[in-house]
Amino acid sequence: MSRVFIVALTTALLGFFATDLAALKIIDYQKKLNPRFAKRPRKSTRFIIIHSTEGSLPSSLRTLSRGKVRRRRYISRGGHAHYLIAKNGTVYRILDPKYRANHAGVSMWNGLTRLSDHSLGIELEGYHNVPFTDRQYRSLKELLRILQKRFRVKDRDVLEHYRIAYSRPNRFHKMKRRGRKKDPGADNFDRRRAGLTDAYPSDPDVVAGRVGADPDGIQVARKSQPRASTRPARTDGKRKADGSLAAAARGPKKRVGNGSLATPARNSRKRQENGSLISPPADPTRNSVITAGRTAWKIAGRQYKAATTLYRFPDGRSLRGHEIRDWSDIPSGTVVELGVDEDKVVSADRAEVLLPVIGEEMSPWKIANVLHNSSFTFYLYPSGKILAGHRIEKFADVPPGTRVLIAYRRVPVPRTSDPLGEDLDDVFLSQQTLYLLPGGALQSGEQIENFAQLPRGAIVFAKVE
């Protein structure tokens, strides 16, 4: 084959790929990449990983392209995705798909680790518990069609981030375990709307015992998966496409995923992915609700007092595990959410930050402790009045429903004509910077959709370092 022919063929293929992409509204954002980001090819392209940004478009674009910021310093060099799909369906190309993006983090699938070396990363603007838009699904479906054809990735190998991420052993669990990430949402992301018709029926790494199952998410993950391939299962004990052994159709014993022989389950019980016997799964939403016979410990285990475990009480209040003092009086109907980001809590009906609220059981002292009367603690009254702790004479007169903001300072409202806030200091886009908007909604810097149209009367609080 002549060199001229090879060059011509390559040019034709690239031209066909460019024609396909022309059907999408794509904005090339590569010029914004951190100059310290080193472009290098991936080892292979076996998967495509879907993420959600957990923030607004301005903050997400900056983080994905320039890097993560902590205390006004970049702690990474950007290049954290190949594409981002905004709520209006616009696709931003963060990094050329031929290069490696650092997006998967600590990850494993079917025994393969470090999946950033073997996958493309696509981010959806939004949150793991807030539905994505029709326009996002349409753009994602088309983008997946193009990328899957170019890199020969099957539907089942388009994976959500929560499926592949795992936590290393720590003081809470002695083995690797799923559950480190929740995006794009086990019961939120709809594979069928993205054009995906096949999925792994189970987690091959949990089946093989390489990682432990996510105790909070495995049932939900099963429920949200589309039906896997409808081809008849093998009955001869041969290996399936994912490498696991198929169970025999009949016989007194069956093989589980790790190849060991198992006794048939009794009393209509079934086997989990790790081979242990369980009762038929209950409604996953009920599993997270405290009842007379279902305590916080039964739901969250050792995580029941963790800062990342959120309790939503029937009266509308919310507290984290480490904020609860009296565990004998948790009311039935309280919803328990595990793995909630410590820096922000996103409401399912609107994106906003939820703060501790003063009530009968929660006094200023219980919420803020020694900082309850500090000039860095602000009380957001239901009436709209705002007072710093050092200006309050009688804390007993602070009305119920008052939200408490601890260790913050007021800063000027940023002024810019750029909706993405490209010319603003990083502190204004930080997830720790809070914007109190007219009407009482509280959003973090990474949740602001348009910095050029901040409403009149907005108040900004920056975290005290």
Image (cartoon, grey):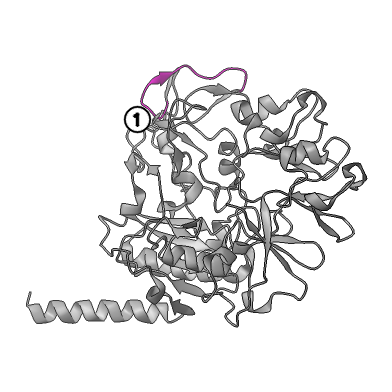
Q: Tell me: 342 left or right of 370.
A: left
Q: Give, as a three-letter code, the residue at label 1.
A: Gly
The residue closer to the viewer here, 340 or 227, is 340
Q: Residue at x 32, y 65 (%)?
A: 36
Compared to residue 309, the image places residue 406 above or below, namely below
- The vertical placement of 25 against 301, above or below, is below
Horizontally, residue 452 falls left or right of residue 295, namely left
> Which residue is at the front of the view, 133 or 19?
133
Disc 1 secondary structure class: loop
Q: Residues within 10 Å of mark 1 (few under 14, many from 20)?
A: some
Q: In the displayed structure, would residue 97 be above or below residue 377?
A: below
Q: Is residue 115 left or right of residue 443?
A: left
Q: Does the segment drawn in magenta span residue 262?
A: yes
Q: Nearer the viewer, residue 208 or 130?
A: 130
Magenta region: which residues? 256-268
Q: Residue at x 74, y 35 (%)?
A: 289
In the rendered image, residue 264 lying in the magenta stretch gets the answer: yes
Q: Quadrant of residue 410?
A: bottom right
Q: Say if residue 429 shows up in the picture.
A: yes
Question: Residue 151 placed where, x, y %?
Answer: 32, 63
Q: Quadrant of residue 126?
A: bottom right
Q: Quadrant of residue 106?
A: top left
Q: Position of residue 454 (x, y in %)?
A: 69, 74
Q: Main structural element of the magenta stretch: helix, strand or loop?
A: loop
Residue depicted at x 59% and y 66%: 428
Q: Position of residue 302 (x, y in %)?
A: 60, 26
Residue, disc 1:
237
Q: How many numbered marks appear?
A: 1
Which image quarter is the N terminus in? bottom left
Q: Residue at x 49, y 73 (%)?
A: 91
Q: Residue 321's x, y, as percent?
A: 68, 34
